Image (tube, rainbow, N blue to C red):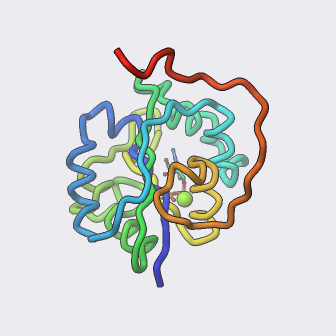
Amino acid sequence: MKQATLVLIKPDGLKKSLTGNILTRLSETKLDIIAAKIVRPNRELASEHYCQMKEKPFFEELIQYICGEIHDKHKVMAMVYYGEDAIKKVRNLCGATNPEEAEPTSIRGSYGRITSAGIYENVIHASGNETEAKREIKLWFEPDEIIIHLFPTKITEITSKVRVWHDRRP
Ligand code: GDP
Ligand code: MG
């Protein structure tokens, strides 16, 4: 069954210049990238993304981590991968949540670490199941940022002010 899954290269992955390596590893899956962008997550987006972790003792550190406050690198690379069994294929390649328990050749096993403060710096996020994937993709991407039609959309009139280029031509 074809599925879409959200992948985030977390701030530690960007700080360690691992983007190329991680994308190369992900290309082993032969899945299609159908959306990609660099995002500066704010606390609201981060808290919504990790809403299921709200009760965890490490929630505050997790929010600081994904917002880039710990690495002074306030960005993540957000992507949607699409294809047959996408969720499982990407999760297998990522490895276990705890980078020290992750299979050594997996992305997290290769590049992750636990800091002395106990933070799991596991360089990558990948949706865990279809429900999570749907929620997460809709949280990080607008319909027009994804090159195929994934979920139902509607046309709505927006009256708020938006920033546009001052002049498209030099
Ligand atoms: P994932 O789906 O493999 O990313 O794992 P979860 O959804 O369970 O957790 C989300 C994120 O919270 C993980 O990727 C880690 O960054 C962090 N996390 C999960 N469990 C722990 C933990 O026991 N300790 C710490 N410090 N961070 C954790
Ligand atoms: Mg998860």
Question: Which quadrant of the figure has residue 106?
Answer: bottom left
**Image coords of residue 33 (percent x, y):** 36, 59
Up the image or down, 12 lies above or below 51; here it is above
Q: Is residue 159 left or right of residue 110?
A: right
**Image coords of residue 149 (percent x, y):** 55, 66
Q: In this figure, what is the number of numbered marks? A: 0
Up the image or down, 65 lies above or below 147; here it is above
Q: Residue at x 43, y 41 (%)?
A: 37
* Quadrant of the snapshot with the C terminus: top left
Q: Residue at x 45, y 46 (%)?
A: 78
Q: Residue at x 67, y 41 (%)?
A: 47
Q: Is residue 40 left or right of residue 106?
A: right
Up the image or down, 108 lies above or below 11; here it is below
Up the image or down, 154 lies above or below 58; here it is below
Q: Is residue 56 left or right of residue 114?
A: right
Q: Pick the residue in front: 42 or 4.
A: 4
**Image coords of residue 41 (percent x, y):** 55, 33
**Image coords of residue 101 (percent x, y):** 36, 60
Q: Pick the residue in front: 110 or 167.
A: 167
Residue reaching furthest to the bottom: 1
Question: Which quadrant of the figure has residue 86?
Answer: bottom left
Q: Pick the residue in front: 54 or 44.
A: 44
